[in-house]
Image (cartoon, grey):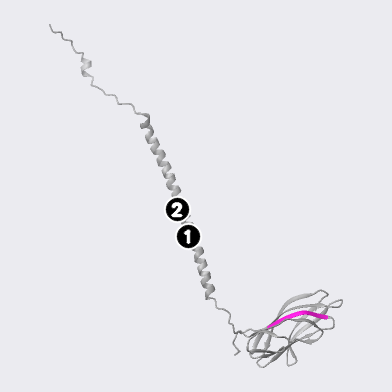
Amino acid sequence: MSVFFPLTPHLLASPLVLKKPRSSGRELRAPMDQGMIDVEGGRAVRQRSGAGRLAAVVAVQNLLVVACLLVTVYLCMKTPALPEDDVYIQFSELRDLTANTSLTFEAIREHHRLENDKGNISISCTGPYVWHMLVCYQSMKQGNLSGNLVLQVANTPVNSVRMDAIEQTVCRGLHSIVYLKEKDVASFHLYSPKGFWMVNVSMGLRYLLGNKCDY
């Protein structure tokens, strides 16, 4: 004889529910790890970007330095040199001059338009000249003594330089502007009292208008 067991109504009505498996800790950590990677990746990108900007700035600075050097060299090469045929004369040094005397210089450099004959200078160019000199002098007596270096033409003073000597040697660089004419013959003289000692002197004349004598 067959036996039947009745089915309970609430069992028939309940659907079968499948539980979702629990997420592992690795799956939960994955989004966090990805976020950390993104942050570190952004930091690396920013570092690379900053290094690139610094390299660009250094490169621009180097280019500017090179450009400045090139411009400087170009300007130096384009600057005209002083003409070699300027009208001038430079005399050798004289030493141990005392009292009144004429200076008989020997020329060590001269232009053909200024001719030297034992300190007598023949002038070929009319115009202004700079008369420059380096002199050392001393008083051989107690107290100060004054002497004068004179540039003269035909025994007529054109210009002079005053020197005030003391008991110690004094050295000075001096210059004066003089106006000389073509065919003048210039000479130099020391006028001083006894006891005035010119230790040494060197001087020269240079025409201020270059090599043009049509002034």
Is disc 2 surrounded by few (<14), some (14 to 19) or many (20+) residues within 10 Å? few
What kind of element bears circle 2? helix
Work out whether residue 76 or residue 112 is closer to the camera in this orientation and state it: 112
- Relative placement, left or right, of 184 versus 140 is left
SS majority, magenta: strand
- Whether residue 70 appears in magenta in the rendering, the answer is no
The residue wearing badge 2 is 52
Residue at the image position 37 percent from the left and 34 percent from the top: 30
**Residue at horizontal 41 percent and vertical 38 percent from the top:** 36
Residue shown at 68%/87% (left/top)? 179
Q: Quadrant of the C terminus?
A: bottom right
Specify the amino acid type for callout 1: Val
Indicate the position of residue 87 as horizontal and vertical percent values: 63, 85
At x 40%, y 38%, the residue is 35
Where is residue 15, by image quadrant? top left
CA gap between label 1 and label 2 equals 12 Å
Mark 1 vs 2: CB contact within 8 A = no
Counting from the top left corner in percent of width and height, residue 54 is at 48, 54
Give 33 or 120, whichever is nearer the viewer. 120
* Label 1 vs 2, first from the N-terminus: 2
- The magenta stretch spans which residues? 196-204
The residue at which mark 1 appears reads as 60
Reply above or below: 53 against 195: above
Rendering quarter of residue 204: bottom right
Which residue is more in the foreground, 95 or 74?
Answer: 95
Q: Relative to 59, is 98 on the left or the right?
A: right
In the displayed structure, 42 sits above or below 15; it is below
Residue 137's disc number: none
